[in-house]
Image (cartoon, rainbow, N blue to C red):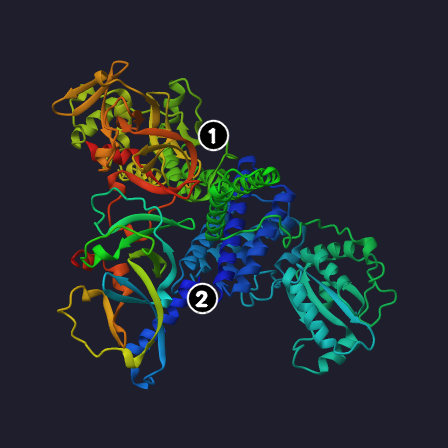
Amino acid sequence: MMAVSNQAYANDKLALRGGSAVGHEKDEEITKALTFALGEQVYGIEIPYIIEIISVPKITRVPCNEVPYFIKGIINVRSKVVPVVNMRSCFGKEEIDYNEKTSTIIVSMDDISVGLIVDEVLAVLSVQQKFIAKTPELNNVNNNKFINYILEMNDGIKLILDIKKIIFDHDLMLRGE
Amino acid sequence: MAKIESGMDAMVDMYIFESNTLLEQLDEILLRTETANVFTDEDINEIFRIMHTVKGSSAMMGFENLQLLSHHGEDMFFMIRENPGKIKDSRFIYDLVFRMSDLFKAEVELIQNGGDYVPTDFSDTIADLEKGAAMIRDVQNQPETSTADSPSVPASTAGVPALPRDENGMSVRIFFQEGCKMEHLRSFLLLNKIREEAHVIDYEPKNLEEDPNAAATIIENGFIITFDKEDDNTVTNIIEKAVNIASYEIISAQENTSAEPTPPPIVEEVSAVIETFVPTPTVSSAPVASPPPRSYEQAPAQQPAPNQQINPGKQSIISVNLSKLDQLHDIVGEIITTETMVISNPELEGLKLESFLKSARELKKLTDELQDTVMSIRMVPLAGPFQKMNRIVRDMKVKLGKDVELKIEGETTEVDKSIVDNLNDPLMHLVRNCMDHGIENNAQDRVEAGKSAKGTITLNAASSSGEVIITVSDDGGGIDTEKVLKKAEENGLLYKSAREYTEREIQNMILLPGFSTNEVVTEYSGRGVGMDVVRQNIEKCGGTLTVESVFGEGTTFIIKIPLTLAIIEGMEVEVAETIFTIPISAIKESFKVKGSDIIHDTQRGEMIMIRGVCYPILRLHEKFTIDTKIVDFEDGILILVETDKKNVCIFADRLIGEQQVVVKPFPPYLNRYNIKGAGLSGCTIMGDGSIALIIDVANLIEGYQ
């Protein structure tokens, strides 16, 4: 239930940003985002999509040839069966062994939940209009297909993911390599 | 009203549910009385009550056409009730009421489907119902009195449907305590309270809320409510419980509405009824009648009213949305999993925990009970779908001119609600098939074959070891295997030489797609789509359908379905780290073998001979590409599984044990991948929180060959 209202909130915010963001003060907070690292690169996910963050539990592989390599299997999150995706292999990076910093971020949209395995969860930051980079053409950057927008902040660039694509656009993910 | 307002959904749901339940009750009574050919007073009253309730709720929902229809049905039964034993053509009445009930159901379905609802016009049927009512009335009136021709025809007040007849109403005059103030609002509140429980026809004065003079009128004349006399007890109860009421009295319907003409025979009846209610017929219109016919003080002594109708407002059954039950079921599953996590928590190891373990046992007992109860809530008896078949047999009996009796056995057998919903259609098709193809067309043929002229169709349900077995059998001609074989050949359904088919195989051909032996396509069956659709529907809810038949003696369709979809009895097996659950119902045996027992076939791989039969071996680790150390047959275990088509031996590392598991579908994120085709039907969460994969034996074998 929480997830649904959160999403409504997120959609609201997205609409604001996509449409007439002009009305926004430069330092007004649009939303919050959770940042995580994959190797050196920092990514972010908007908080409203996030259900919870857990360590990497025991993953049960789904032994079916059709299931793509980046879907690692299914996990039990408080009696709910949730699929997990390794963000490294999803973004065409080499997979590494899970360690104590490896985390699973459970995201949800339209009642579909997915666990995203990331190297390390970093922080929660405030997304403000003034940080959003004006770079509409991102097509040359690798794995940009999943990027909603880019934040340019003092401590570096953060790529905010488009959760909708990650949850619904399997084909895009398959071509992601 | 062309559209159902939003926000009324819950009420519409309730209305649909109620109406359907009542209409089914109606059908049941009609079928029973039709067989017995006698209407008891109780039946008539019950039908009358059903019609009345339906009418009331339709009016409340604003479905005027339905209200009108049930109103006229009610009228007709009123006539029947008033003129017992004088019905000449009962067939006509039955057909009429069945027709009405069907129309009503169809309309309710329309409403249920939502969207732009356009009310159907029922004027034809209403006219027939009026005719029916008139017919019954005339039967009564002709011999008795000439006043029957009086212009004041009762009941057919089609012009004013909102105001039902007076003869069915009863009025009560209420006086409030002197000086209690705001009489009009008090009246309004009382009226609303009565409306909740009873059917209020009229009240006086109107405009309670707006008209300030209403209070004065009430003080002077009392507040008069006309309600359905069947609700007598309910209304008097409410009035007695209300505060600030000085006294109330029951007054006759005519007094209150004397302006409207009432036909003579009815007047007699109404007065008679009223006399039983009112011991002293002296009813005055003065503010305080002396003595009040039925005052507040003496009312309780006279409480047992002649009409001992049950109060429809009080039921011991409530209807619950299935999704809420699913939710409850999920939570219980979570509780049980969590319980195991708590009790067998590794941190407790080595501690002396006497009272903890005692409490844990107590908790376990309670959660087991909770689980059983939740499961039992979802279980419903098969009586509902079975009873519906009565109606089909009845209709087809008339249309086909076959004399058939339907026997129902074991209808108290319970299955999961979701299965019952999926069973209606298959059952209907099977019963139709028995009626149409099974039972001989000519009763003479039956007699010649040494059977009774009357055919019998038997519906039976019984549960045995986690399965419900439903049989639909007839004592008709049975399946002519030669004819079936010939037909199958013509339709190109044979894949081996005709002589190689066993009798059972041939009989089951009638379940194949595109098979129909009936030359003529009838209204009911014979298009050759029926039986395989039936089979598919049953397979959809995890069941199987088979046929057994003895030529000349009859045919039996056997449906086997799991007791519930959500929980299966499973055998846990392990392949390296992965745990699989194989449904126990598919397992024939499990055993260890020596490597020398294995037969290597160049074409079909490894096989094993058990009691003279050769079974192929399927290595789970190969099938699902799992790395395991156990690849020699001596180290692992073989499990012989069977589905209706094939047997195969599954090779796994080891057996873990037998366990009841809650089946969970794979998450929707994975829906686009054909996991089921790979031989996995779902997953389940085990006691320790890990996930086991449930093997779909049929698909596993299919994919293997």
| Looking at the image, residue B184 lies above or below residue B555 | below
Q: Nearer the viewer, residue B42 or B617?
A: B617
Provide residue B175's location: percent of width, then percent of height.
79, 71
Q: Nearer the viewer, residue B374 or B626?
A: B626
Residue A24 vs B3, above or below: the answer is: below
Q: Dot 2 corresponds to which residue?
A: B4
Residue B701 % position (x, y): 24, 32
Query: Which sits earlier in the primary sequence, circle 2 or circle 1?
Result: 2
Which residue appears at 38% of the width and 18% of the height?
B448
Quadrant housing the C terminus of chain B? top left
x then y, percent, for residue B541: 37, 40
Q: Nearer the viewer, residue B187 or B648?
A: B648
* Nearer to us: label 2 or label 1: 1
Quick one: label 2, few (<14), some, or many (20+) residues within 10 Å?
some
Q: CA distance from mark 2 to mark 1?
A: 42 Å
The correct choice, above or below, for B190 with respect to B430 in the image is: below
The amino acid on which the numbered mark 1 sits, given as a three-letter code, is Ala
